[in-house]
Amino acid sequence: MLLSLDFSSKLPIYMQIRNQIVLGIASGELAPGEKLPTIRALAEQSGVNMMTVSKAYAALRQEGYITADRRGGTAVAGSPGAGELSARYRGALRIIAAEARLAGMSEDEFAGLCRDSYRGGAENG
Amino acid sequence: MGETAVIVIWFVVMFPCLILVAALLTNEAKPKKNIILGVTLPLLAQSDPRVGDIVRRFKRNVWLCTGAMALIFAALAFLGTGQFMMWSLALLIVAVFTPYAFYARANRKLAALKKAEGWHVPYSGGVVVDLRAAAAPMKALRRRAFLPPMLIAAVPLILALLSDDEGVRWGGVIMFGVTAFVGLVCMLMYPLILRQRGDVASPDSDVNAALTRVRRYNYGKMLLATSYLTAVFMLAYWLLQESALWTLVLTVVYMFVLTGFCLATEFSVRRTQERLTAGESGYVDEDDLWLWGMFYNNPNDRHLFINDRTGSGMGVNVGRPAGRVFMALTAALILGLAVVSIALALGFSAPFEAHIESGTLYFEHGMEKYEIPLEDITSLELIDDLPSARRIAGTGLPNLVEGRFRVEGYENTRISLNPEEPPYIAVLTPEFSRIFALGTPQETEAFYNELKEALS
């Protein structure tokens, strides 16, 4: 799986790393149990600070997407399987829905877009 | 050694440099990792006739420029040994860098065509990392592999340092110290490649991992070969140092073997990169991070040293302040070298001048200048044969011997003369000796008499 970092984006680098790994897991590009680079290796490969990678990994670990232990390193945990979105992302979805409505999209169109994104995450990422 | 032989040897050493630069640059026109002349192009665009046209013009310009420079080199041979060597050094610097102007121009043209046609690849404008390839362990050389050549290299250095003779000591430190330093630099440079970004040119992690492996393996091979070859060269040089011919032959052989090996390795890496990505449709585009396709400019990348886009070399990230300082110093060094060689070339044609004024002897030839108060002179001789002399730092050409030398029977000696025009004047003081001559034997003899009279 390729991780692309856009330094001109307003989205912080650690969030870009976090988001792309989540997308990779959802699309199946990163299989459960698959090893991820160490913090040091990913920092060296991407040219970003180790703290940035550490922050992204910490967020992913907290959300249950990855596991980390001293011996085995960092690996994909798969889907946390909570069955629902966290309050934070439900809030974000509400804002996106509001923006879609203001942009003039119909409910069906927005639902279709959500469906495509949901399936895309599972099929091609 | 005759003047013609020196020119031929110098030409044999310099001329391949021009060919190498041209060969390396024109090789950049072959697509590797979907990059042609520093521009990432999708597979279909690579066969576009307009791209082919830019590439053809670029190659033609580089080879024409190389040919013209070679002709100027040949013409310089008529200036005589000293001037030829110094002017050719200045010209070599110009000749090596001029083709890069053609590269930058072709790069801009290709980039403009790419923009106009809207050719793009899936990943553009950012830094891309292959997570799977980055997570895979990769074999690396152990540092101790660099230790044997360093130990070999230390032998002549230590022996030179233990010498009672000051000239041998300093000569040894300069000659063997610098070459021993090469081994250390190779050892310290190796870990750099392991900390660089891996190659990403395909959606297939196996291909990306293979590209990274090829680069790292060959980079390590080149550094290891450099340190071992340099150590062996230095040892052989030390054993044969009494023979000027053998040390010259050894130096030329060493340069050719080392350059040949490194080039063969570099081209092998490029061929592998070409082969591994031949069928790729173009995947990762980092063109925006490369100025004129040559200089990596990414202030967000904390790396100071970075991989070249193709081949196995390394460059500097000019997006970082330290990178800019590094580049400025390198440019100043190259410019300085050109200026010094031009000054030396002018010095070769400068006249030998000496006069006595207010009780002081003044001597001048190009950059070689000194003054000796007459009251300090303890001995004055007119000699027809130059005593056995070993150069510490300076010039030793058939028609010019100049600089600091270790001379049998003289202390702390500087020489400045044309060995083909005896006699020579030897001036001794309690602290140093100077051996010099003027433009013609008559002038030298006349000045000797003048000096003798002034001393009496």
Image (spheres, coloured by chain):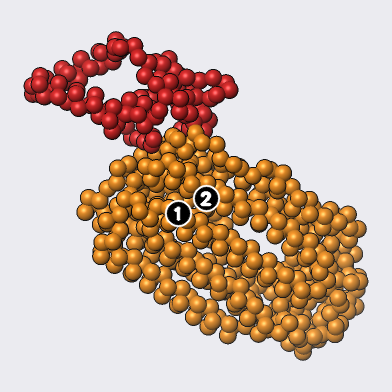
Chain colours: A red, B orange
**Residue at the spot x=33%, y=49% of the render?**
B282
* Circle nearer the N terminus (2, 1): 2
Neighbor class of circle 1 (other Cα within 10 Å; few <14, some 14-19, many 20+) is many
**Residue at the spot x=55%, y=51% of the render?**
B329
Relative placement, left or right, of B16 versus B421 is left
Q: Under tag 2, what secondary structure?
A: helix
Q: Which residue is mark 2?
A: B214
Asked whether B252 or B342 is in front, the reply is: B252
Q: Under tag 1, what secondary structure?
A: helix
Q: Quadrant of residue A25?
A: top left
Question: What is the chain identity of the residue bearing mark 1?
Answer: B
Q: Position of residue B210 (x, y in %)?
A: 48, 47
Give yes or no for contact between labels 2 and 1 (Cβ–Cβ under 8 Å).
Answer: yes
Relative placement, left or right, of A107 versus B203 is left
Q: Which residue is mark 1?
A: B273
Relative placement, left or right, of B142 versus B337 is right
Q: As shown in the figure, which amino acid type bears the numbered disc 1?
A: Gln
Checking the image for residue B104, the label placed there is none
Q: Position of residue B191 (x, y in %)?
A: 60, 42
Q: Name the quarter where the N terminus of chain B is drawn.
A: bottom right
